[in-house]
Image: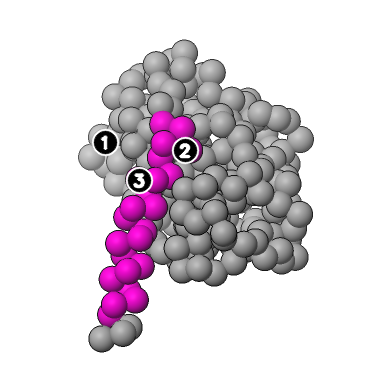
Amino acid sequence: MGTLNMLGLAKRVGARFLLTSTSEVYGDPLQHPQKETYWGNVNPIGERSCYDEGKRTAETLAMDYHRGAGVEVRIARIFNTYGPRMCLDDGRVVSNFVAQAIRKQPMTVYGDGQQTRSFQYVSDLVDGLVALMEGEHIGPFNLGNPGEFTMLELSEVVKETIDPTATIEFKPNTADDPHMRKPDISKAKDLLNWEPKISLREGLPLMVGDFRKRILNEDEGKGA
C-alpha cells in the first residue's frame, strides 16, 4: 500500500520513483548466481511469502505506473547489506552473529549452516542507489556483493574479528529458507558503472566497532 501511495504521489508531482526491492523476489532460486532475467522460485503461501510476494507485487505496480502513466521508476533488488547503526536485534544474520559474539553468547546457526548469502557494505549500496537514480535505466538491477559465504564461513569471519573463542549453537531451520543467494551484477557493472568495493573482512570491523560501543552503553545502562 505504501508503494501504491508513493507511486500515486510521483505521478501527480512528476517525480522519479525509487523502489528498493529485494533479492527475496528470487525465492529459493534454481538459478545460481541470480540474474535479473530470472523470474524466481517463490512459495506464494509460505511463512515468508508476505515479504517475497509483497516485493514482487511492488515491482509489478512500479512497472504498471511506468507503462500506464509514464512515471519514471527505478528498481533496485538489494542483496544482504550490513554496516554501522543497524538495529542490534533486528534478526538479520550479520547483526545476530556480531551482537551475540560481543555479548559472549553462542552464535545461532539455523539448519546445517551450509546455506549461502552475499554481504555488501552499506556505503557500496548507497553508491549503487545514487548511480541508479542519476542514470537513465529503469532496472531492475541487482545491487549486492558477489562474495558468497556459507553461514558457517560467516561465523568464522565474525570469530576472527571479535572473539576466537566464540561458539555456535545449531537450531532447526526456518521455513522456505533460501539455500543459495548470490547476485550476478554484470548488468549494474555495464549500465551503471557500479560494483562493490568493500570486502566482508574490511567492512565487518567497521560495523563491530559501532556495535561494541552501543552494547557497552546498553550494559552500563543496565548496571546503573
* Quarter of the rendering occupied by the C terminus: bottom left
Q: State how far apart marks 3 and 2 are (Cα).
A: 10 Å
Residue type (three-letter) at the residue carrying disc 3: Leu
Q: Is residue 68 visible?
A: no
Figure check: 175 above or below 117: below
* Residue lying farthest to the bottom in this orientation: 224
User: How are the colours assigned in the image?
Assistant: one colour
Residue linked to disc 3 = 206
Q: Position of residue 214 (x, y in %)?
A: 31, 65
Q: Residue at x 52, y 47 (%)?
A: 160
74 relative to 101 in the view: left or right: left
Residue depicted at x 74% and y 58%: 111
- The circle on residue 50 is none
Q: Residues within 10 Å of mark 2 (few under 14, many from 20)?
A: few
Q: 219 or 35: nearer the eye?
A: 219
State the residue at coordinates (54%, 69%).
105
Residue beneath disc 1: 15
Q: Position of residue 26 (x, y in %)?
A: 65, 40
Disc 2: which residue? 201
Residue type at mark 1: give it.
Answer: Ala
